[in-house]
Image: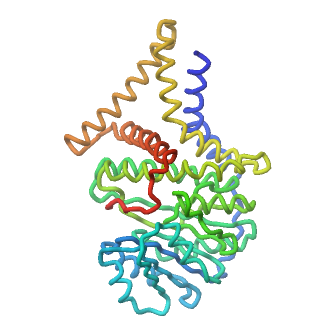
Amino acid sequence: MAFFFWTCLGLIIYTYLIYPFLIITLARLFPRKSDFNENEFPQVVMVISAYNEEAVLEEKIKNCLAIDYPQERIQFIFGSDGSTDGTNQILSNVDHSNIQVKLFPEREGKSSVLNKLVQGIGEEILLFSDANSIYKSDSVKLLTRHFSDPNVGGVCGKLKLLNPSGTPGGEGEGLYWRFENSIKKAEGIINSVISANGAIFAIRKELFELVPTHLSLNDDFMITLQILGKHRKVIYDQQAVATENSSPDMEGEFARKIRISSLNYSAVPSMLPLLHPKYGFTALSIFSHKILRWMVPFLGIGMLVTNLILLDQGGIYPLLMAGQVLVYAGALAGYLGDRIFDNSGPFIPFYYLAMVNIALVIGLWRSLTRTQKQTWKRVPR
């Protein structure tokens, strides 16, 4: 029982603290030498799948046309996935030679729309984006410069979340993304990012494979896995920035996390071949950053139960039990602060961490029972 307890505790500490510390330290000790050509401008197509995006679509179109990149070398393709609001009308009114529009009458899900939009594209670089992601004007240049290195298969930019309403959900999400971005940066320096963000993600067109649509999957994660499976690298450029507004409340963020968790669990069969030792650091990163992270709620339950059983042994176990109680009490205090005062104060990290792990449990159930739909409804931001 003691062995089980310390194993659960050790794995949680490893995935949340030791692994990030290890790779960030290694990245600082062995920084990657920049190998890119600032003056090369490959042909780029930005692909945007949209469903009921009338609130943000006009701003996105203006943002696309304001991007600092040779206009003859960039195109934008918008696909409406059976939208029922004003999305189709906005897109139908677009009249610009650099923008193509495809309106799909039936809603099939983002992966299906991306597959259809990409077919027939002959340009060198695909750039995946979201309708609510606003790019800094130089982001495309910063992303594409890395493709002068033939070993680079994809480049992930930095998603910066804005929290104009100052909500606990937005603040917690911001903390999470700052943590994740620091890990992505280090992974990209040492070897490869293992999970790019689909809001600002460029890849070589030749490496794109159709995203499976018979299962509910996270398309940007699957595309990353496809690139890694071909022994190409995905790197992270923190200077290439896209911004989005964070979730307005924790309920919206909770629903989003459940959906993402379910889609990620469904990708596990595609991840397993990459755990082979021949993939080296990629295998270690997938195990440490993804698989163990997704196991945390179950490791936490195992740690709690075994700690209760071990209490009568005295020693350090009562102190560790008290520590667990404080963590759960902090999460509860954050929840009550959010519900009553709309402010979780210093308890936001505990509250957000608890929300993420509860979402993982629900997401696993939806994945196993295949009750997670491929179609999505964007959380208002």
Looking at the image, the residue that sits furthest to the left is 340
At which x and y percent is residue 219?
Answer: 55, 62
In the picture provided, is 98 more to the left or to the right than 235? left
Q: Residue at 48% across / 74% down in the picture? A: 48
Q: Residue at 55% across / 48% down in the picture? A: 265
Q: Say above or below: 81 vs 190.
A: below
Q: Say above or below: 371 vs 145.
A: above
Q: For residue 183, say whether it is visible.
A: yes
Q: Say above or below: 20 vs 113.
A: above
Q: Quadrant of the N terminus?
A: top right
At which x and y percent is residue 353?
Answer: 42, 40
Q: Residue at 42% across / 74% down in the picture? A: 106
Q: Residue at 51% across / 24% down in the picture? A: 303
At which x and y percent is residue 115?
Answer: 56, 72
Q: Say above or below: 330 vs 41.
A: above
Q: For residue 178, say whether it is visible.
A: no
Please tell me in which quadrant of the rendered image residue 40 appears: bottom right
Please tell me in which quadrant of the rendered image residue 228 appears: bottom right
